[in-house]
Every structure is written in C-alpha cells, then in structure tokens.
Amino acid sequence: MLLTFVGTAGSGKTTITSTFGKYLEEKGYNVGYVNLDTGVKKLPYKPNIDVRETVTVEDIMKEGYGPNGAIVESYDRLMPHLDNYLTEIISLEKDNDYVLIDTPGQMETFLFHEFGVKLMENLPEPLVVYLFSPEILRKPHDYCFVRFFALMIDLRLGSTTVPALNKVDLADDLKKHRKYLEDIEYLTARLKLDPSTQGLLAYKLCTFLPEVSPPTRTLYLSAKTGEGFEDLETVAYEHYCTCGDLT
Ligand SMILES: Nc1nc2c(ncn2[C@@H]2O[C@H](COP(=O)(O)OP(=O)(O)OP(=O)(O)O)[C@@H](O)[C@H]2O)c(=O)[nH]1
Ligand SMILES: [Mg+2]
C-alpha cells in the first residue's frame, strides 16, 4: 500500500510519516519510507529512498539561488531521475506492506511541479492523505475550503485523497470541527446565514459537494499522540481491499 502525505508547510507530513510508520511496524508490518523533500535537513525516520541523494536545496543555494528558486531548481534537476524513482518506489512497495511517502515542505512544489504530478500519476493506486491543522478552521467557509481542497488534490494528482485534520491534540473544539466537516447539511445551513461574498460562494459550493465528493471519510489525527491511527490504517486498508469505498 502506498500512502502519500500532502499538506501545507508544518502540517505534520514528516512527523506522521515517522510516527505512523512506527505504529505500523509495532503491529508487525513491514514499512518502507520515501522522502521527496529536497529541503529537509533532519528526518525522524530512516528513508529507504531519499531524493536528497540526488540533489538538495542547500547545495543549490550555494550556487547563488534564493530559497524559492533553489526549491524549484531542485525538482527540475530531479526530473531526469523520475523513472528511476518510480521504479524504486514500486519495487519498495513489492517488498513491504506499506510505503509511506513524505512530500516537499511547500505543498505547491508537489502539486504544481511536473515531478510530483507525474510521479503520482504513475504510481499504482496511491492513497493521498491531505493534512490540515485546526488553526485554519476559523469560520464556516473554511470547512468548505478544506473539503474542496481535498477534491482539488484528487483532481490534480488523479489519486483518491482523504482529508485529515492533524494536530487534534491542539484542537480546542474537536466536536465542532467534526460537526462542520461531516454534516454537510448543517454546514450548508450555517453558510446560508452568512451574507458575505465568501459565505455565498461557500454556500453555493457546498450545495453540490455531495454530488462531486466521493464518499470519503474525514480523519482526525495526531501525529504526536497517535490518535486516529487505527482509522488511518482502516481507510488505507479499505482503499486497497474494497475498491476505494472509504465511507
Ligand atoms: N501538537 C502537535 N504537533 C505536531 C503534530 N504533528 C506535527 N507537529 C509539529 O508540527 C511541526 C511541523 O511538523 P512536521 O512534521 O515537520 O511538518 P511538515 O509538514 O513535514 O513540515 P515541512 O516539511 O517543514 O513543511 C513540528 O514542530 C511537529 O512537532 C501533531 O499531531 N500535534
Ligand atoms: Mg516535512
């Protein structure tokens, strides 16, 4: 099974790759680890495949690039190696029960660069876990945003994407977050009361969310405490064993 963690900078991709990997290993599974972040300095897990063996942001910056230019340049330089990485990841999957893929710190590098898109398009049935943090959920339209963002990732990468609220150990009001994320009728009713342009847009989007959204379950995780890891394991299992029904 291939699990790819995607999310904005600091959302917990690297931590969960490590802690969920340990959780699976403790249950007796063989786990392979892939690091696709050219910019990371230290990892809490030992990667079997690591793009930093080809190129690092740090080295490119020594050539005079700024941080953003160096990130893009690093993925340009990875492009000629794409087929090798694909072969290596597929072979790692054959030798393991799970392969966990940690993606670049900056999410847009993965979603907008050919390297990330082509890699995901050519991997066999990878499940994407889209991590977001409680602090971005301030208003009703933010819940609509994360639900659609998961769909956008699915659209862009062509991979089933599960939205996952990470850092639930820091969430003040988990019950409220769950209600807004799961009860679309409730969310839509709340959005109807918002007269702002944002509210109106979110209301319109939410009314057809049930039509366009696959019956995906939302996950509530803590990469720190391990909360929700059983659910993540179940969703991954269902993705592979019951033809993508993640309800
Ligand atoms: N409290 C709490 N902190 C977390 C959790 N997951 C990650 N963190 C913390 O959030 C920070 C960022 O975590 P990372 O795992 O490096 O996140 P990332 O998405 O890999 O970050 P970049 O690759 O740098 O974009 C670290 O300080 C982690 O310890 C969580 O579930 N709970
Ligand atoms: Mg990281």
Image (cartoon, grey):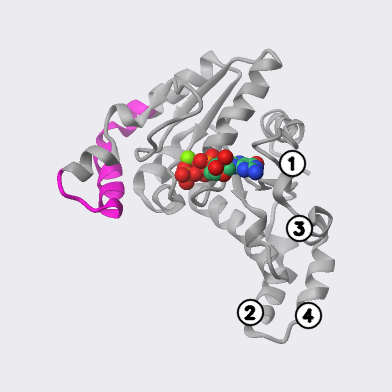
Asked if the magenta segment contains residue 194, the reply would be no
Tell me the SS state at disc 3: helix
Going by the numbered disc 4, the residue's amino acid type is: Lys
Q: Which residue is mark 4?
A: 192
- Disc with the residue nearer the chain's start (3 vs 1): 3
Going by the numbered disc 3, the residue's amino acid type is: Leu
Q: Which residue is mark 3?
A: 181
Kindly indicate whether the residue at mark 3 contacts the one at mark 2 (C-beta within 8 angstroms): no
Q: Which mark is residue 246?
A: 1
Picture residue at 84% right of the left edge, 55% below the top: 175
Going by the numbered disc 1, the residue's amino acid type is: Leu
Viewer-nearest of discs 1 and 2: 2
Tell me the SS state at disc 2: helix
Viewer-nearest of discs 3 and 1: 3
Q: Which residue is mark 2?
A: 198
Q: CA distance from mark 4 to mark 2?
A: 11 Å
